[in-house]
Amino acid sequence: MLLIRRVRQGFTLIELLVVLAIVAVLLTLAVPRYLQHVDRSKETVLLENLQTTRRVIDRFYGDKGRYPASLDELVESRYLRGLPYDPVLESDQGWQVVPVPEGYEGMVYDLHSTAPGNGADGRPYADW
């Protein structure tokens, strides 16, 4: 008596649909959390870049007795390696320069982002 065995190859359509449904459920849980972490990391980098640039402006004033004429002067004087990057705007050109108060020499007193919207804490990026 000969027994014929069927060799099963591949997966059935139902098995593939079940696997795809499980993957889809996992993605709907993971992707929003991933995007929140990306936004939070952009805000952290923006805050660090603002703090670093403000410290550099203060050091420039301490060394030279005047404020810089532009952000480019900070780079040319080697206080910064390059213009600060705004990760929310994804540019190094989106800065609002706060002018120097009367009685002081220079042009750059402070720096703010021009990114639209609010951070996770509810404050507008322009107020950071």
Image (spheres, helix red, strand yellow):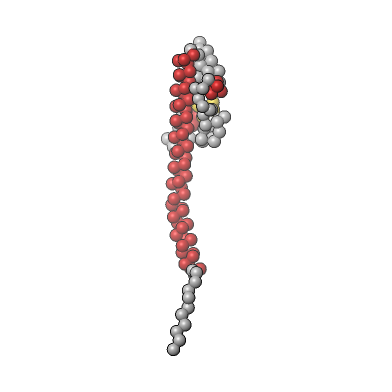
47 is higher (above) or lower (below) than 8: above
Expressed as whole percent of the image width and height from the top left, the position of residue 69 reads 55, 18
Q: Is residue 37 above or below residue 51?
A: below
x 46%, y 58%: residue: 23
Residue drawn at x 52%, y 32% is 86
* Position of residue 113 measured from the top left corner of the image (x, y, whole percent): 51, 29
Q: Residue at x 45, y 19 (%)?
A: 59
| Residue depicted at x 49% and y 65% | 16
Q: Position of residue 49 (x, y in %)?
A: 47, 29
As drawn, 46 above or below 11:
above
Nearest the viewer among 117 and 79 is 79
Percent across and percent down for residue 89 are 54, 35
Q: Is residue 125 visible?
A: yes
Q: Which residue lies most toward the bottom here? A: 1
Residue in front for this viewpoint, 74 or 2 = 2
Looking at the picture, tell me which residue is in the foreground, 26 or 9. Answer: 9
